[in-house]
Image (spheres, coloured by chain):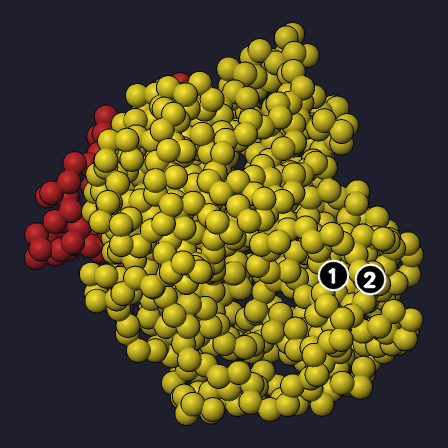
Chain colours: A red, B yellow
Amino acid sequence: MSPRYAMSMDTRRCVGCNACVISCKTENAVPEGCFRDWIAEEVTGTFPDLQMQIRSERCNHCADAPCVGACPTGASHYGEGGTVLVTASKCTGCKACIASCPYDARSVHPQGHVDKCTFCLHRVKKGLQPACVEVCPTRSLTFGDLSDPTSPVARLLASRRFTVLQPGAGTRPQVFFLT
Amino acid sequence: MALTRRQFIQVGAATAGGAAVASGLPTRWWGLDGDPVPDPGTEGEKVVPTYCELCFWGCGMLAHVQGDRVTKVTGNPAHPLSRGMLCPRGAGATGLLDDPDRLQRPMIRRAKRGEDVFEEVSWDAALSEVAEKLQQVKARHGAEALALFTHGSGGTWFKALMKAWGSPNIGAPSYAQCRGPREAAFQLTFGAPLGSPEPIDIANARCITLIGSHLGENMHNTQVQELAEAIGRGADLVVVDPRFSVAASKARYWLPVKPGTDIALLLAWLHVIIGEERHDAAWVAAHATGFDELKAHVADKTPAWAAEITGVPAQQIADSARLIASARPASLIHPGRHVVWYGDDTQRERAMAILAAVLGSWGHRGGYLKQDRFPLAGYPHGGAPPPTRPKVDRPKGGKYPLAGEVLASGLCDATRPGQTLYELQAWLVYGCNLIQAMPGRPQLLESIQKLELLVAVDVLPSEICGFADVVLPECTFLERDDDAWNGPWRRPFIAARQAAVPPRHDTKPGWWIAKALADKLGVGDHLPWKDANDYLQARLAVKGQSWEELSRTGVLLGKEVPTCVEDGAEIELETSSGKAELYSKELEELDFEPLPVYHPQEEGPPGSFRLLSGRSPLHTFGRTVNNRLLAQPFPENAVWLNADAARALPGFERTPLVEGDKVVLINQDGVRSTPVKVKLTQRIRPDCVYMVHGWGQNAKRLRYAHGRGASDSQLTTRFKVDPIMGGTGMNVNFVRLERAAREQA
């Protein structure tokens, strides 16, 4: 069975430290000012009755990815395990994908093509975890294969409550936020 | 028409709308592509184990090296503190190595101190200048007139230099400007200071109480790992903080106390726990003295009494006390780390230690553990004769009797005439920017201007370098060998610092600088090692420990020993009574309060806010603010202001502040900050403002950080000294806000 790559992000454990952001930047040599992942803090309530959710966010590798449909050249496509990828050599930098992504998960690389999270497939192929997962001091991030019900990510999603970002967008995100 | 790729992209961008319309077409007909996820090639051709110096926790890391570049660093899985994971600062270590503003060559000052006008010179010229001036100081004032301020692993070498030279005046701001009161309080209560890393078992605690500590923003890697582990297991958090910190957002109880009233809250907690007999009576009977006095002391400290003082409802105080007690002994009262707030900090930490004691958490899993150091021998050869005069970090008249380490603030004071037994005339400052570390900047600058010699050893052109007569550029930790890390831990271990790449520019490792200077001073015989590795190998050889293993894996693990009662360890207390001293006879004899008493703090002028400061997980004080990698997610600090308080702010009636506006903070003494963005938030009480420490750097050579954000320490012109141990309480300043002038905004 072909894999279905996904990630869960435990909002209870995450402290929003940005280690995922920095390690992604050095692992993937992401240029200054571009980010493939980032921290979101969502505060609700008024002093002193407050709540805050902290999330490490990235491309959701949607199963119905608007960016893939929007891409006029085929650069944005579904890759191994359902990941959403950009082939740099086919990308013209038209930014149609950026306009269509409800999550603002893409940026323009200084070399002109669009840049985004790859789930570190170059590491996954070697049996390693994505860089953000490996570095995370709070072990908030779990990456794996949903088609394998015994994988840690599948078990977490089977046992914990979770949300996805903007479910109304109909994109079927594959990054899940444990609450 | 031939288009360059760049022009083609621009055309593409301009016609994005059209492209989007065409997007329904099948797009995969271009056929098979090459690998869409090319390997970015950052794995490197070799991996060098070392330990991190972005903060002082000392996490084990692996430097991935390609040629003379470090492509990335990752956590060393074999290292007990990092366990394969890094905090963002560590992960951003290459941002320090590659910082374009690094010091490159030795420099000698050619204008007034602080004007930052220097001439680059050779190492020989720089070291000769230092040696000549030091000999003059020694001839006139004695060798002891030289002080060393040091923070960081390279301090080993300069401490050795000081010993060889004959001065005992070695201090670090990490005591009296940071964790000192905690060390004194735990020494008084349990007979030993806590040290670093703290012997606390966060992972196994069922309830964790943070008092002003914002763990999670304060990013000591192992502790944050364990905090997440505990949360994952369902542990409860109780967080006492005027600000809705990250930790507070995960807490069962967030108690936003009025700043400066923590002792009242702690006494009320003790009242509830002891009054309702929720304490660990067996532990107290076996291991503590002074319980009856404590019980009588807190008998009238009711939650209602504390509610009046702290602003926290009585019911919440009582309920949180019961939760804390319900988890004992695995109920951890976190001792905090940066705890110099109000000048009565030893007493507040005493109240925390007493609470930990009555919960019976000392010695138990989920509480305070036993730690040990790896049995690494000292350097086996030689040793200089001891200095003839005592150190002068304390003023005449026997103040601060329980200071357990040298007071850096005291050394600064000892430079001004008449305060101490003799005066300091020269400073050697290794890796600590005293300008931001010390409160009372006017007095500090006065001290600096009085010096005959100020030498700064640093990696970056920090503010203190601008005041130095001679600046000696050290290479970064990724470019040098150092002494082993040998802190205490549950399973004792040491870690190796190893150069991953050669030093860039004309920088040198600390061991080389100290040794070369010792040679110039004619005391090189006392630093007889060839280099850092030779030094460490000699230490290891004493007990036949393996350099090969240490070098290869980055760590050498000691024997596993029991760390808590559950593992078979015994509770041993090194107080004079052999028991935990809830009531402190030692304090009583010194005429201090033997049990903590709440004294109200002074209020600020009307319309002002108490100035509080803290940490960002991305930065270590001012040491990382110029790191281009770390600055991307956190480019500058902002001043946190309660959004409702902002609406009522005098002077802003016509054009209310909005998020991101720039303001100037003006403290009670009229000192004005640099312009800083305002963060309007519900996450803070309306009577205080908060900012991350380390920004507002004056050093022009820090081209990124210069002029960004504002400095809390510049506004800390007032401080209250803890009479017990000399800590400088810094949360006693008040600011008002003014909109920054247009040209500044």
For image coordinates 79% across by 45% down, the residue present is: B443
Q: CA distance from mark 1 to mark 2?
A: 7 Å
For image coordinates 69% across by 31% down, the residue present is: B675
Q: Taking B429 as reference, is B548 left or right?
A: left
Q: Quadrant of residue B669?
A: top right
Residue B282 at least partly seen: yes
Badge 2 local density, few (<14 within 10 Å), some, or many (20+)? Answer: many
Residue B243, percent across and down? 46, 30
Q: Nearer the viewer, residue B422 or B83?
A: B422
Residue B433, percent across and down? 68, 55
Looking at the rendered structure, which numbered label has been put on residue B422?
2
Q: Are marks 1 and 2 on the same chain?
A: yes
For image coordinates 47% across by 22% down, the residue present is: B309
Residue B84, percent across and down? 34, 64
Q: Chain of mark 1?
A: B
For marks 1 and 2, the one nearer the N-term is 1
**Mark 1, residue position:** B392
Q: CB atoms at circles 1 and 2 under 8 Å apart? A: yes
For image coordinates 69% across by 84% down, the residue present is: B384
Question: Which amino acid lies under the numbered mark 1 shown in the image of this protein?
Answer: Val
Q: Taking A176 as reference, is B670 left or right?
A: right
Question: Which amino acid lies under the numbered mark 2 shown in the image of this protein?
Answer: Tyr
Q: Quick one: SS at disc 1?
A: loop
Q: Chain of mark 2?
A: B
Q: Quadrant of residue B253?
A: top left
User: Is the C terminus of chain B in the top left, top right, bottom left or bottom right quadrant?
Assistant: top right
Q: Nearer the viewer, residue B181 or B621?
A: B181
Q: Nearer the viewer, residue B679 or B555?
A: B555
Residue B627, percent across and down? 59, 54
Q: Quick one: SS at disc 2?
A: loop
Q: Taking B13 as reference, is B145 left or right?
A: right
